[in-house]
Amino acid sequence: MAKATTSIRRQLIFMVATVLILINAVALWSTHIYANRAAKESYDRLLYGSALQMAENITLLDGKVFIDLPVSAFETLALSTSDRAFYAIMNGQYQVLTGYKDLPNIPFPQLLLQSKEKEKFQPIYYEADYRHERVRFVALGKRLLEADNVNDVFIIVG
């Protein structure tokens, strides 16, 4: 019996196809990673913008915290009909002043560390399971100053 040999043409087609498949797989994988990163970054900006709008409308008067939540903070997050917005505004003793009382995994140690180290709070982004869904949150602190009174409040938006 004669041994069957493959032609050079078939070998070349097989090698070129294998290389192209590998290159396409790497390209798809890197595109997927980049797209996820870009989507997360843009959504983080929406969350941060909403938290900043809320923070701008929190004031301290005679030692009491006054909150005037702008509608625009929620309109920004409600651009998608399938998304829901969750929020809480808490005082320095972690008592909810307004919003959802059961938000998960709030990074208070990181927020408190920032409040002792710096005058300006940096946003902290995190994900947590809330109401049977994976939710992206931003936590932001704000220092309220009055003549003889200093109060920290924390804004959490998801």
Image (spheres, rainbow, N blue to C red):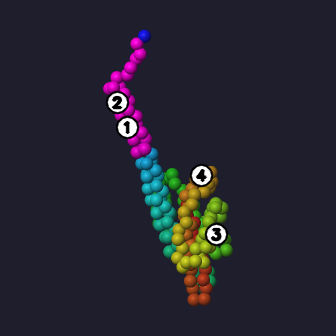
Q: Residue 19: say if magenta.
A: yes
Residue drawn at x 61%, y 73% as measured from the top left? 113
Q: Nearer the viewer, mark 3 or mark 1?
A: 1
Q: Is residue 57 visible?
A: no
Residue type marked 3 = Pro
Q: Position of residue 87 (x, y in %)?
A: 58, 64
**Mark 2 neighbour density, 10 Å: few (under 14) some (14–19) many (20 or more):** few
Q: Position of residue 129 (x, y in %)?
A: 62, 54
Q: Are marks 1 and 4 in contact (CB under 8 Å)?
A: no
**In the figure, 81 relative to 149: above or below?**
above
Mark 3 = which residue? Answer: 109
Mark 2 = which residue? Answer: 12
Mark 1 = which residue? Answer: 20
Q: Earlier in the sequence, mark 4 or mark 2?
A: 2
| Real-space Cα separation, disc 2 to disc 1, in angstroms | 12 Å
**In the figure, 102 relative to 144: above or below?**
above
Residue type marked 1 = Leu
Residue at the top extreme, as displayed: 1
Q: Nearer the viewer, mark 1 or mark 4?
A: 1
Which of these two is toward me, 8 or 123? Answer: 8
Q: Is residue 145 left or right of residue 3?
A: right
Magenta stretch?
A: 2-28
Mark 4 = which residue? Answer: 133
Dot 2 falls on a residue whose secondary structure is helix
| Real-space Cα separation, disc 3 to disc 2, in angstroms | 60 Å
Q: Are marks 2 and 1 in contact (CB under 8 Å)?
A: no
Q: Is residue 48 visible?
A: yes
Dot 1 falls on a residue whose secondary structure is helix
Residue drawn at x 46%, y 63% as measured from the top left? 45
Dot 4 falls on a residue whose secondary structure is strand
Res 93 quadrant in image: bottom right
